[in-house]
Image (tube, rainbow, N blue to C red):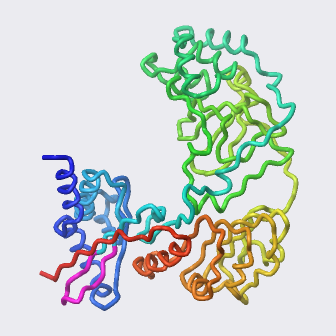
């Protein structure tokens, strides 16, 4: 069987109604009323690693905890689709199930977003619309600022570090000169002196140790093999547009670490055992040192924390908690206007404002007049009904990212007031109440304004009730 024919067979599996029938049967049983009226729909998303499917979990039998077997039918039904996705090499599929014209039947829509949108987060609605090829959120584009005069910490001592490691790990196997040269060529930068010294004593291969805890206890982290050391630049920290656009890079004169998404000077060599990466920092903040040790959190999308002023400080002197930082009060670059936070747009406005998010609001709708003309305002996000005049958005001339509910987008489109300089946009639709097919139609109107390919990959399968 040729590769092209084999691929077609796999696609048939994914887009064959019989692959979806067990899941559709469960959805019909759980949403009988919804799927029996015109316009009724349910939607979800399935990928090989996770899924969001609107099915209730069955309560466990009295006296015992929940078990996989309680929802075995659901796991089996979704599993058929997951296997088809894996065979097809697909990252995932979104779906919408609607009542069909045939009594008791359903219409299944399978959605492929193509290249013009990021996938939604646990939803069938499209994620961020990508309005310019290759455009990235501003924080991802930011490079480290130069810090003239930055030097290694007084505690950095290569000889002391190596001597201590050899004393504490007498059986360690060090990396050869050739292994270090290969690593440096791959990284594109020479290893900092302390990091080179560490690997000359401990090369980090897992097979070198009978007890994995021994090097952890000595070094203070899980040491990566030299072949896995990498540069934690911005590209290494995958940031979805809708999250990156809501962040701001901020580094104050009191900061030891620059508040970046990533840096070409962050060289990752370890892990804390919980998914946070440990790195040597060659691009410190104003109060930092070249070669300081930082921790890059796996749950956040920006910034890093100081661990120790040097690798010697961490390994020899067992310092892991950084230094206290005295914060200076200043207007936030990211402002949240809502009933529990900043009380008005006037209170949020200042020349450095980059991100404005308008959330739950129980008073009169707000005017954007106080932020018109702000030179750095690049992101606006607004809840339904919070804007007195959505068309004021057209006067925010520096916007790169805009997130609005469908009704507000409709106003902008009808008035020809969609900002022309956007790089990305989001339609904040209600996950289950709003039909993703309508969201896609609206998205295609926005994409058309920017000459982007529409979301066109929608396959419709229909079956009458048996």
* Residue 173 magenta-highlighted: no
- Which quadrant of the figure contains the C terminus? bottom left
Near-viewer residue (96 or 376): 376
Left-right relation of 121 to 55: right
What residue is rendered at 42% in x and 76% in y? Answer: 436
State which quadrant residue 321 falls in. top right
Horizontal and vertical percent for residue 84?
24, 56
Residue 379 placement, left or right of 128:
right
Residue visible at 45% across and 61% down in the picture = 115
The stretch drawn in magenta includes residue 98: yes
On screen, 136 above or below 400? above
Where is residue 413? Give x, y as percent.
58, 84
**Residue 438 in the image, given as x and y percentages of width and height:** 43, 81
Q: Nearer the viewer, residue 400 or 172?
A: 400
Q: Is residue 358 above or below residue 198?
A: below
The residue segment tinted magenta is 96-108
């Amino acid at each position: 069987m040729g590769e092209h024919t084999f691929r077609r067979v796999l696609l048939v599996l994914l887009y064959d109604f019989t692959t979806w029938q067990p899941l559709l049967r469960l959805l019909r049983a759980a949403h009988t009323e919804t799927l029996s009226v015109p316009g009724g729909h349910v939607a979800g998303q399935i990928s090989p690693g996770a899924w969001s499917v609107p099915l209730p979990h069955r309560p466990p039998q009295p006296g015992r905890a929940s078990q996989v077997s309680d929802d075995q039918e659901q796991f089996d039904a979704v599993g058929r689709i997951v296997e088809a996705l894996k065979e097809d090499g697909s990252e995932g599929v979104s779906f919408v199930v609607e009542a069909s014209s045939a009594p008791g039947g359903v219409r299944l829509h399978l959605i492929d977003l193509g290249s013009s949108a990021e996938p939604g987060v646990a939803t069938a609605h499209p994620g961020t619309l990508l309005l310019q090829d290759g455009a990235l959120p501003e924080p991802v584009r930011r490079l480290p600022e130069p810090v003239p005069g930055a030097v290694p910490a007084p505690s950095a001592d290569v000889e002391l570090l190596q001597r201590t490691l050899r004393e504490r790990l007498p059986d360690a196997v060090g990396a050869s000169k050739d292994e270090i040269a290969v690593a440096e060529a791959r990284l594109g930068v020479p290893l900092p002196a302390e990091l080179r010294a560490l690997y000359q004593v401990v090369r980090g291969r897992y097979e070198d140790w009978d007890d994995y805890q021994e090097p952890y206890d000595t070094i203070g982290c899980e040491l990566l093999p030299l072949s896995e050391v990498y540069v934690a630049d911005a590209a290494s920290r995958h940031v979805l547009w809708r999250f990156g656009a809501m962040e701001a890079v901020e580094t104050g004169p009191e900061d030891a670490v620059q508040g970046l998404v990533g840096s070409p000077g962050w060289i990752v060599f370890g892990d804390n055992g919980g998914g946070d990466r440990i790195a040597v920092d060659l691009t410190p903040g104003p109060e930092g040192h070249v070669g300081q040790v930082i921790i890059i959190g796996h749950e956040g999308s920006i910034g890093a924390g100081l661990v120790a002023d040097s690798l010697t400080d961490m390994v020899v002197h067992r310092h892991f908690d950084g230094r206290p930082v005295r914060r200076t009060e200043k207007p936030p670059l990211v402002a949240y206007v809502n009933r529990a936070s900043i009380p008005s747009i006037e209170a949020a406005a200042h020349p450095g404002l980059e991100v404005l998010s308008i959330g739950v609001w129980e008073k009169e709708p707000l005017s954007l007049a106080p932020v018109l003309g702000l030179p750095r305002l690049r992101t606006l996000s607004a809840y339904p009904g919070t804007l007195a005049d959505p068309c004021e958005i057209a006067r925010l001339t520096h916007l790169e990212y805009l997130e609005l509910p469908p009704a507000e987008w409709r106003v902008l489109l009808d008035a020809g007031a969609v900002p022309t300089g956007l790089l990305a946009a989001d339609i904040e639709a209600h996950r289950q109440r709003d039909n993703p097919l309508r969201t896609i139609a609206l998205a295609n109107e926005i994409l058309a304004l920017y000459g982007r390919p529409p979301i066109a990959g929608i396959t419709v399968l229909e079956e009458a009730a048996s």
